[in-house]
């Protein structure tokens, strides 16, 4: 599908979005932003009580939301989540691979169980979900948008206790670049956002361990998730029709270049 030019529209009316890790933090915000732009949103995470609360907020604002309980370490659940979203709302045309965890341990001290868990959640899950969503879009001959949430840590080492997290997020960014080439001819755009330090539950845990890291940043602040809204909408919407295989860094000038 080619949209008429010039096109700066971020209207998502008629689109169906699936957002993982939607029970808190960035995922919570992403779901609300996509719904406010007109998309029907399937919100997926383990904590169903939080998902129900988010769905209620979205519905109260006039949007459409469908909660899906999902453990992203379970491959069968990943495939089933896409099916559930499609059955409830229609073909998934926007996927936001947001679910992720930190490692918070020095590399040589990590257990095999923790190594597997970080890679399962941060790398394996978004790859499986991307392939499942793309498979259905290809069968339907429909365009789509896949947005991976990487991290600036995939480009700049975040410090002791973040080695595997850095590796996994570099993989998420590269995943977007590689899959973009796989599906470019079908009109499926795959991109990534690489945030710096943004307010979230994960960041709260880091601040508890490391203290006020904002004082090291040029702007002396932790960024607000709302400062990512415009980038998310751009990548999810017709406005980014010619943008694929791109990683957009949003770190508020926090890190070295």
Image (spheres, rainbow, N blue to C red):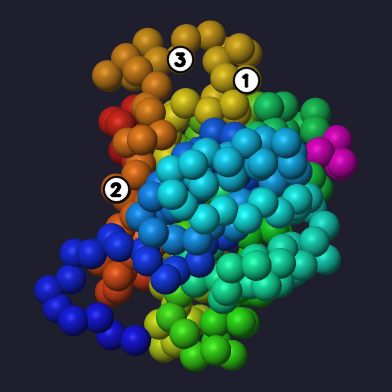
Bounds of the magenta segment? 111-115
The one nearer the camera, 59 or 4, is 59
CB atoms at circles 1 and 3 under 8 Å apart? no
Q: Is residue 73 above or below residue 4?
A: above
Residue 156 lies left or right of residue 115; in this view the side is: left
**Considering the numbered disc 1 on the image, is that residue within a helix, a strand or a loop?**
helix
Q: Residue at (66%, 42%) from the top-left corner?
A: 51
Label 1 – label 3 distance at C-alpha:
12 Å
The one nearer the camera, 110 or 90, is 90
Quadrant where the N terminus sits is bottom left
Looking at the image, tell me whether mark 1 or mark 3 is earlier in sequence order.
1
Local packing at callout 3 (Cα closer than 10 Å; few below 14, some 14-19, many 20+) is: few
Local packing at callout 2 (Cα closer than 10 Å; few below 14, some 14-19, many 20+) is: few
Quadrant where the C terminus sits is top left
Q: Position of residue 120 (x, y in %)?
A: 75, 52
Q: Residue at (28%, 74%) from the top-left corner?
A: 242
**Considering the numbered disc 2 on the image, is that residue within a helix, a strand or a loop?**
helix
CB atoms at circles 2 and 1 under 8 Å apart? no
Nearer the camera: disc 2 or disc 1: 2
Can residue 4 be seen? yes
The one nearer the camera, 83 or 58, is 58
Q: Is residue 170 above or below residue 2?
A: above
Local packing at callout 1 (Cα closer than 10 Å; few below 14, some 14-19, many 20+) is: few
Q: Residue at (59%, 90%) from the top-left corner?
A: 139
The one nearer the camera, 217 or 239, is 239
Q: Which mark is residue 213?
A: 3
Residue 23 placement: quadrant: top right
Q: Position of residue 19 (x, y in %)?
A: 57, 54
Q: Which mark is residue 205?
A: 1
Looking at the image, tell me whether mark 2 or mark 3 is earlier in sequence order.
3
């Amino acid at each position: 599908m080619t949209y008429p030019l010039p096109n700066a529209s971020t209207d998502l009316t008629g689109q169906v979005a699936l957002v993982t890790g939607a029970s808190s933090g960035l995922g919570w915000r992403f779901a609300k932003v996509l719904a406010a732009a007109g998309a029907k949103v399937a919100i997926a995470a383990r904590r169903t009580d939080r998902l129900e609360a988010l769905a209620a907020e979205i519905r109260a604002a006039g949007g459409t939301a469908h909660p899906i309980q999902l453990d992203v370490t379970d491959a069968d659940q990943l495939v089933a989540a896409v099916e559930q979203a499609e059955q409830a709302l229609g073909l998934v045309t926007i996927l936001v691979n947001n679910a992720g965890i930190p490692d918070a341990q020095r590399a040589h001290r990590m257990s095999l169980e923790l190594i597997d868990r970080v890679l399962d959640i941060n790398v394996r899950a978004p790859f499986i979900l991307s392939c499942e969503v793309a498979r259905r879009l290809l069968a339907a001959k429909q365009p789509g948008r896949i947005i991976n949430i990487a991290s600036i840590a995939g480009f700049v080492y975040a410090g002791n206790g973040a080695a595997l997290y850095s590796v996994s997020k570099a993989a998420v960014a590269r995943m977007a670049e590689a899959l973009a080439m796989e599906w470019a001819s079908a009109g499926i755009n795959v991109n990534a956002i690489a945030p710096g330090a943004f307010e979230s539950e994960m960041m709260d845990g880091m601040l508890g361990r490391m203290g006020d890291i904002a004082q090291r940043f040029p702007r002396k602040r932790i960024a607000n998730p709302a400062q990512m809204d415009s980038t998310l909408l751009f990548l999810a919407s017709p406005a980014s029709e010619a943008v694929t295989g791109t990683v957009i860094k949003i770190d508020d000038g926090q890190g070295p270049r």
